[in-house]
């Protein structure tokens, strides 16, 4: 007698909920994303006696699922053997609520159904999931039946990449990069507004976009529209880290906002080096400084290339104006004149009042701005992290 199995799974809880063969990733899903599990179906003697399991489709791809959306799939299990087939749930690979689990008996030539229901809860930036339900059977060739579901969670729109990373961009060359925004809604995607979040040096960034062709957005499972954005980083950006963000206001939902950070660094003929200095972020770490003693620290500027002899430096701004000093020494040819070296001395003089410029954001740190006469690198910023203690 045909009996049904209803396996309702009310919630998919976080990445930490995954165990066993669960696999999460935040990269584009492809044929290699889900790690293989042991082979369930093997070649068997078609005349073998006893119960035999046959599944119409052991793995089901939901495609795209909206976050907090619920979808279900019913697997059809058939007993193609000569004796009674039994099925019993062993486990699922996530923490979930089971509405009903029954041991099932399937007569020869009969079928039963197993329904898996998944609710895509808030799981951070994870976009792709794969889950498994395991059943024990009395089929000696398939003692463990694995049913799998997989899919991709979307937020209506998704930017790819979600962060634009550019490293060691030459200061004297324009650099162009692209990004894509996919739409999974029914309404054609439209950009309502676009802006640069960080206004400093905004003239050195340029942004354009165009609508995707159908062949472009169809490469992303479930996408119905999309745009391709082009970003140009122009010459003249200061040496050091890039901290910029594209903010797009889209016509999805309640004017959906997508932020796409741009991170990287600008390289040039000017190299800054020294102990306790982070070149990728242009940060000098002085740590805790005793007010009565102060501190003096040295960095070195190295200038190469055709403009090495004509490049000059000048301190144009120091914040805080009191309690932090910077002086630039004379030019010194090294390496047979192929490089010009400058010694830069940074001081917190004795007697400086207590204060703190610690933190993780550049805006929390003290700042020294040094202008240059180099044609492509107009400024060298130095961010100083320190705290003056009594």
Image (cartoon, rainbow, N blue to C red):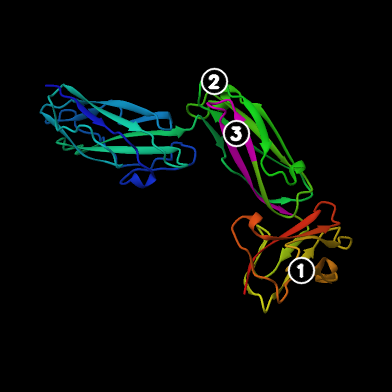
- Observer-side mark, 2 or 1, equals 1
Q: Residues within 10 Å of mark 3 (few under 14, many from 20)?
A: many
Q: Which mark is residue 169?
A: none
In x, y percent, where is residue 155?
49, 32
Tell me, yes or no, whether the highlighted magenta stretch contains residue 258.
yes
Residue at left offset 28%, top offset 25%: 74
Residue at left offset 34%, top offset 45%: 17
> Residue 364 sits in which quadrant?
bottom right
- Observer-side mark, 3 or 2, equals 2
Marks 3/2: CA–CA distance: 17 Å
On screen, residue 223 above or below 309? above
Tell me, yes or no, whether the highlighted magenta stretch contains residue 390.
no
Q: Are marks 3 and 2 in contact (CB under 8 Å)?
A: no
Quadrant of the snapshot with the C terminus = bottom right
Q: Residues within 10 Å of mark 1 (few under 14, many from 20)?
A: some
On screen, residue 40 above or below 210? below
- Say left or right for 324 vs 10: right
Marks 3/1: CA–CA distance: 45 Å
- Observer-side mark, 3 or 1, equals 1
Q: Are marks 2 and 1 in contact (CB under 8 Å)?
A: no
Magenta part of the protein: which range?
Answer: 246-267
Q: Which mark is residue 180?
A: 3
Q: Are marks 3 and 1 in contact (CB under 8 Å)?
A: no
Q: Residues within 10 Å of mark 2 (few under 14, many from 20)?
A: few
- Say left or right for 387 vs 336: left
On screen, residue 381 above or below 104? below
Mark 3 and mark 1 lie on one chain; the one further toward the N terminus is 3
Pick the front one: 210 or 97: 97
Mark 2: secondary structure: loop
Residue position marked by numbered label 2 in the rendering: 187
Mark 2 and mark 1 lie on one chain; the one further toward the N terminus is 2
């Amino acid at each position: 007698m045909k009996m049904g199995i209803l396996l309702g799974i009310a919630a998919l809880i976080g990445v930490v909920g995954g165990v066993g063969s669960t696999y999460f990733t935040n990269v584009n899903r492809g044929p290699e994303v889900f790690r293989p599990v042991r082979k369930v179906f093997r070649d068997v003697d078609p005349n073998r006696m006893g119960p035999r399991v046959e599944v119409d489709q052991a793995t089901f791809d939901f495609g795209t699922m909206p976050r907090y959306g619920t979808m279900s799939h019913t697997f059809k299990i058939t007993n193609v053997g000569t004796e009674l087939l039994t099925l019993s749930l062993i486990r699922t690979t996530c923490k979930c609520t089971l509405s009903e689990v029954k041991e099932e008996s399937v007569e020869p030539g009969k079928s039963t159904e197993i329904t898996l229901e998944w609710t895509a809860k808030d799981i951070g930036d994870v976009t792709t999931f794969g889950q498994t339900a395991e059943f024990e059977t009395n089929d000696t060739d398939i003692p463990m039946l694995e049913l799998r579901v997989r899919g991709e969670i979307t937020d209506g729109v998704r930017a790819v990449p979600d962060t634009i990373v550019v490293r060691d961009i030459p200061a004297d060359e324009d650099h162009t990069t692209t990004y894509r925004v996919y739409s999974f809604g029914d309404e054609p995607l439209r950009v309502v507004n676009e802006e640069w979040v960080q206004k400093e040096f905004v003239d050195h960034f340029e942004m354009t976009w165009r609508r995707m062709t159908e062949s472009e957005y169809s490469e992303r499972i479930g996408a119905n529209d999309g745009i391709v954005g082009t970003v140009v980083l122009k010459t003249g950006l200061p040496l050091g880290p890039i901290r910029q963000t594209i903010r797009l206001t889209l016509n999805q939902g309640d004017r959906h906002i997508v932020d796409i950070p741009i991170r990287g660094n600008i390289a040039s003929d000017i190299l800054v080096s020294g102990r306790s200095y982070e070149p990728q972020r242009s940060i000098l770490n002085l740590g805790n400084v005793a007010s009565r003693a102060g501190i003096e620290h040295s960095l070195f500027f190295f200038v190469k290339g055709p403009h090495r002899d004509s490049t000059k430096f000048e301190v144009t701004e120091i914040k805080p104006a009191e309690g932090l000093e910077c002086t630039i020494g004379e030019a010194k040819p090294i390496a047979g004149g192929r490089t010009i070296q400058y010694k830069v001395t940074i001081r917190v003089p004795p007697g400086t009042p207590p204060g703190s410029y610690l933190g993780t954001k550049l805006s929390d740190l003290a700042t020294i701005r040094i202008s240059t006469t180099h044609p492509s690198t107009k400024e060298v910023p130095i961010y100083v992290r320190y705290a003056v203690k009594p």
